Amino acid sequence: MTEVRKLAHVMLNVSNAQASKEFYCKVLGLTVSAESADGKTVYLSLGEQHHELALFEGATGPRPTEKQPSLVHFAWQVDDYEALKAAYYDLKARGLTIKHTFQHNITDSIYIEDPDGMLVELYCNRWENGLEAMQTMGPRTDDLDIDTRIATPRQAPR
Amino acid sequence: MVKVLKLGHLVLSVRDCVRSRDFYTQKIGMKISSEKLDRGQVFLTIGEEHHVLALFQRATLDPPTPDQPGIRHIAFQLDDFEQVRAAYNELTAAGIPVENASQDGITRGFYVRDPDNNCVELFCNRGDNGFEAIRSADLNPTPLDMAAAGARHH
């Protein structure tokens, strides 16, 4: 029976690979590990693997509608809550809009949009044993006050 | 300056979360960490993560066309070429169309489609130091003969 060992990378179809490259390098701290001569295929890495994210410039059409199967968001872990809060203010200082700040049962999370409108989550884990926490508490989403880390019931559904 | 630790998870909008769950659990061996079928939500994991893939049943229309922005593929790693070949044989035997078995300078693998036509790559690395290797590797894929390739792995 096949058992995959890990989620290794994602390749995105984007409308402008260079714009997306700049975004992901600045916003997540990724490094370019390889790039095609025409600049339309870019591989980005955290510094050990060949890539965690690849960008392919093949999108000329409209963004998927809410009713099409598609990416809801993809998520990148940061060290701890201090790092998440620092990221929040760093991204705001760069003029990016923070779309959501949520506290889930298992993570504290902030969300931004990439140049093609794809939602990117940055999160820190709230528990040492995340799997056990997920199995016992399940998912949940509250609004998060980034400064106080206080969660309140969500005002509007996402 | 933000510096993330790792790619943690992704969430897909799907047409049928049970059908997608069964694909990811039964075909590539992921485990359920939480599911709320009444809300159309399934969380899947590998190892000790709280989740690496979540499936939200929100979609009713056809999958995106190749010109729409979004996921081009999602890649899951296996330990070595023997596992890649075993997965290839297992999925083929299960009647799942396997696409594009290939190798480049850094990986060997193949692709299958999930129930919403998302392209899922299963691969192994050809060497240990991927970050160094990709800088000088030939990234043009060449077809891989699954039956013949084992003997000259690495």
Image: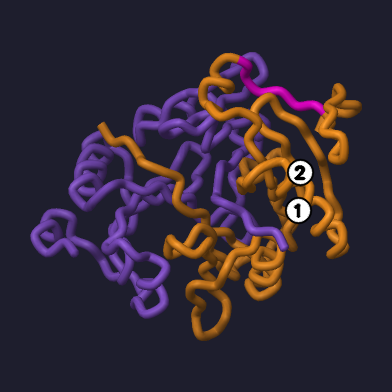
Chain colours: A orange, B purple
Parent chain of label 1? A
Residue A89 vs residue B122: left or right? right
Number of marks in picture? 2
Front position in the image: A2 or A50 = A50
For residue B41, above or below residue B114: above
Residue under numbered circle 1: A87
Query: Which three-letter amino acid code belongs to the residue tagged 1?
Result: Ala
Asked whether residue B24 appears in the rendered view, the answer is no
Q: Visible in this render: residue B104? A: yes
- Give neighbour class at mark 1: few <14, some 14-19, many 20+ (Cα, 10 Å): many
Q: Amino acid under label 2?
A: Ile
Q: Over which residues does the magenta segment extend?
A: A137-142
Mark 2 Cα-neighbour bin, 10 Å: few <14, some 14–19, many ≥20:
many
> In the rendered image of this protein, does residue B109 appear above or below residue B104?
above
**What residue would you read off at disc 2?**
A110
Q: Is residue B153 magenta?
A: no
SS under mark 1: helix
User: Picture quarter containing residue A139?
Assistant: top right
| A22 over B61 or under it: above or below | below
Give how far across and how far down residue B125 sits, in percent: 31, 58
Residue A131 is labelled as: none
Q: Earlier in the sequence, mark 2 or mark 1?
A: 1
